[in-house]
Image (cartoon, rainbow, N blue to C red):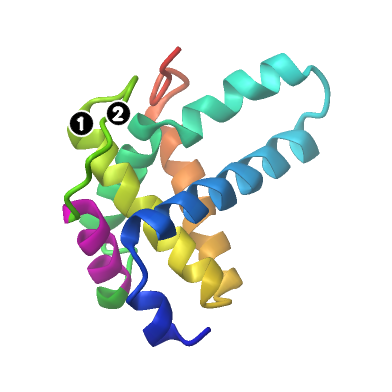
């Protein structure tokens, strides 16, 4: 699949994939750093993969200039995409920002830009950690 074909994909589809990719990266981090109780691991993961956590990370990366212009364009396209789905346990604005973040990750995954994908995921984790243990926690 070419980058042009990937860019033409529905942004909701990219976000769907990006959500799964980010979840795997976060779970891998948690189980390799602190193996043990799965219940505790799940609650830890929620901080990062929730709409609130992803929105905080995305906004911070944009404000700090961490993303390239091309990455921001993909993010904005997905964030601004009109969707019929409504978030269940998230603020609608945070949900749209998180969708943009996930779509960017999905795009990078399909584009085989795994190193950049991991850099962005690691930065997102760092940002959520810096915001404190309560950031992004929705139960």
Q: Residue at x 44, y 68 (%)?
A: 107
Mark 2 touches mark 1? (CB < 8 Å): yes
Q: Which residues are magenta?
A: 71-80
Vertical arrangement, residue 19 with respect to residue 114, above or below: above
From the top left corner, tell me how far across and down residue 104 is, in percent. Answer: 39, 62
Q: Real-space Cα distance between discs 2 and 1?
A: 6 Å
**Farthest-out residue, front:** 84
Q: Residue at x 39, y 24 (%)?
A: 135
Vertical arrangement, residue 17 with respect to residue 126, above or below: below
For the residue carrying disc 1, how many other residues have a C-alpha within 10 Å: few (<14), some (14-19), or many (20+)?
Answer: few
Of 12 and 29, the residue lying toward us: 12
Instruction: Please name the predominant secondary structure of the magenta segment in the image.
Output: helix
Which structural element holds mark 1? helix
Is 73 magenta? The answer is: yes
**Farthest-out residue, right:** 36
Vertical arrangement, residue 117 with respect to residue 6, above or below: above
What mark, if any, has residue 87 been given in the picture? 2
- Residue tagged 1: 92
Is 70 magenta? The answer is: no
> Would you say 52 lies left or right of 108 here?
left
> Would you say 12 lies left or right of 125 here?
left
Q: Residue at x 31, y 38 (%)?
A: 56
Quick check: can you spot residue 64? Answer: no
Quadrant position of residue 54:
top left
């Amino acid at each position: 699949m070419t980058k042009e074909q990937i860019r033409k994909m529905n942004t909701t589809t990219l976000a769907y994939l990006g959500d799964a990719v980010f979840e795997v990266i976060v779970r891998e981090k948690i189980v390799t750093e602190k193996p043990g109780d799965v219940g505790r691991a799940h609650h830890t993961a929620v901080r990062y993969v929730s709409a609130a956590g992803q929105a905080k990370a995305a906004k911070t990366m944009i404000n700090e200039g961490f993303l390239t212009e091309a990455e921001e364009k993909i993010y904005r396209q997905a964030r601004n995409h009109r969707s019929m789905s409504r978030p269940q346990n998230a603020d609608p604005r945070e949900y749209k920002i998180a969708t943009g973040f996930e779509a960017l990750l999905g795009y990078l995954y399909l584009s085989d830009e795994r190193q950049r994908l991991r850099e962005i995921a690691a930065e997102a984790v760092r940002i959520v950690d810096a915001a404190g243990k309560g950031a992004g926690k929705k139960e």
